Image: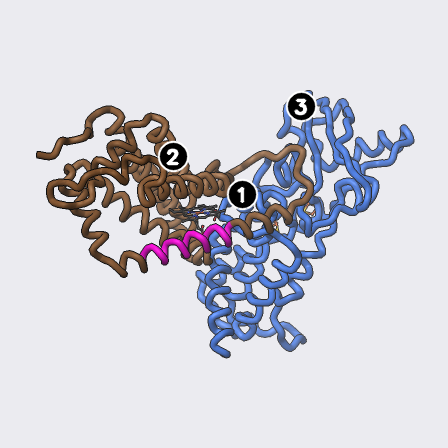
Amino acid sequence: MIVAVTGVILILFVIGHLLGNLQIFLGPAWINGYAEHLRELGPLLWIIRAILLIDVLAHIYYTVRLAIENRRARPESYRRKDVVKASFASRHMVISGMILLAFIVFHLLQFSIRAIDPRFAALPHDPLGHYDVYSMMVLGFTSPLVSGFYILAMFLLALHLSHGSSSFFQSLGLNNKNLTPRLASAGRVFAWLLFVGYSSIPAAVLLGWVHLRSHS
Amino acid sequence: MNFKLKIWRQPSAASKGELRRYEIEKISANTSFLEMLDILNEQLIKSGEEPVAFDSDCREGICGTCSLTINGEAHGPAHPAAACQLYMRQFKDGETITVEPFRVRSFPIIKDLVINRGALDRIVQAGGFISARTGSAPEANSTPIPKHNSDLAMEAAACIGCGACAAACPNASAMLFTSAKISHLALLPQGQAERSRRVLGMVRQMDAEGFGNCTNTYECEAVCPAEISASFIAKMNREYAIASLRDRLGE
Ligand code: HEM
Ligand code: SF4
Ligand code: FES
C-alpha cells in the first residue's frame, strides 16, 4: 500500500521530469527558462523537493523491509526452481531499485549540487541572465562514461517500472478481468517510452546532434 | 519408461537434508506420479532402505495434501493439476526428475517430502468461517444471491488449501490462499456480518505465521491446481483497506 502510493508519486515525478528535460531539444532558451521558472517557485520548489525526498526514503524503507521479510519467509531455497509466469522485471525489483538509488545520488551530486564537475559551477549565465542548464547538460553528457551510466540507469528504471507501473493497481485493490491485462501491457509500453525519452538526451549529445552554442 | 530421480531426504525436522539419487525402470506411461513413488518405495523396502515419506490422501486433486515440488514447479509441470493428477507420460523417457518439498518457513518439514501445513488452518481459524445456527439445512432459495456473485464465490471456494501458491511464490506469500478464503465469504450474504473482522483477523494471522508479502509476480495463479485468480488478491487488498479504515473510525 505505502510502496504503491510512494511509487505512484515517483512515477508522476519521472513523467514531469522527462517533459522538462526534453525541452533541451528546443534549444538553450527553453530549457534555461524552464529551470529559471522552477527556481522562481521558491519555497514551493523546496516543498516539492522535501515531499520527493520523504517519498523516496519511505519507498526504500518499506521495500527493503518487505524484501527482508520475504527472504526470511523461505530460509532454505529450492535446489531447483523453475519460473512459470513471473516476469524478469518482477523478480528483480530490489536490485533494479538499488542501482537506481545509486544513480539518483550520482545524478543529484552531478547536476543539483554540482560536486562532480568543477566546470558546472563556473559556467557563465546565458544572455538572458539565466543559469546555463543547457550547457551543463551538454558538457555532462559529452563524457561517454557518464552518458553510458545514464542510459544504463534509464534501462533499469524502465525495467523497474515495466512491473511497477501496472503492479500498483493490484496493490491498491484495483483489478478487473478485462482491464488488468491491458494495464500490464500499457505499463510496459509506458516504461519503455520513458527509457527512449530519457536516453534520447545523452544519446543526442554523444551523437553531436545537441551541442554547445556560443552566446552572442 | 525409465527415470533418474533426485529426491529430498531429510530424516527429521531438525536434521539436515540432501537430494539423493535413485533410478527406476519399466514404468508404464500411464502410471501416476505418486504411484511411481509407491513403486520406488517398494523397491527401497525390499532392499532394506527407508522408504521416501510423502503425503497424499484423495489422489484426485481435491484434498490438497500432495505437496510436492517437481522439477522446480509446485505440483509439477502439468498446471493446473495437483501432484496426484500428474502422469509419467508428462516426462521424457530417461529424464532426471527432481522432487523437493514445498519450501516455506511457515510449512516446516516433518520428514523427507512431508510438511506441516497447519499455518493455513490457523489462518482459517482466524476468521475464515461464518457464525450461524446449525441444524437442518435451510430452504435453498430462501436467501437470494445474484448469479454473478455466486459464480465468483464458487470460483474462490474451489481453493483446496494445498499451499502451492506459497510454495511457488518467490516471496513465499500465502496471499492467494488467504484471498480465496476471504473472497469466498465476502461475496455471499452469509459472510457479511463478520466481513471486516474476518479480513483483519486472517491477514494478521497470515503475517504472524511468517509468510512473505505479495509483490504481484503472479507465480501463484500459474501453479494453482484450482485455478484461483490473483484478482482475488486485489479484492483482499481492497477489503483490507476498507476494513482497517472502518476499524480506525471506530465502526
Ligand atoms: C531507489 C531505490 C528503489 C528501491 C530499492 C525500490 C525497490 C522496490 C521494491 C522492492 C518494490 C516492490 C516490489 C513489487 O511491488 O513488485 C518496488 C515497487 C515499486 N517501485 Fe520501486 N524502488 C526504488 C526506486 C523507485 C523509483 C525511482 C520509482 C519510480 C520512478 C519506483 C517505482 C515503483 C513502483 C511504481 C512500484 C510498484 C508498487 C506496487 O506494486 O505496489 N521505485 N520498488
Ligand atoms: S489458492 Fe490454489 S495454490 Fe493456493 S492453497 Fe488454494 S488451491 Fe492451493
Ligand atoms: S492427494 Fe488429494 S489433492 Fe493430491
Pointer 3 and pointer 1: residues touching (CB < 8 Å)? no
Rendered location of residue B47, percent (x, y) = 90, 28
Tell me what hue chain A is rendered in: brown
Q: Is residue A86 visible?
A: no
Question: What is the C-alpha distance between the residues marked 2 and 3?
Answer: 39 Å
Q: Which mark is residue B48?
A: none
Rendered location of residue B190, percent (x, y) = 55, 71
Few, some or many residues within 10 Å of mark 2 (<14, 14–19, 20+): many
Principal SS element in the magenta part? helix
Snapshot quadrant of residue B87: top right
Instruction: Chain letter for mark 3, please.
Output: B
Q: Is mark 2 within 8 Å of ligand 1?
A: no
Tell me what hue chain B is rendered in: blue
The question of residue B184 being in magenta is answered with no
Snapshot quadrant of residue B89: top right
Q: Is residue B220 visible?
A: yes
Q: Which residue is mark 1?
A: B219
Q: Which residues are magenta?
A: A48-63
Few, some or many residues within 10 Å of mark 1 (<14, 14–19, 20+): many
Q: Which residue is mark 3?
A: B95
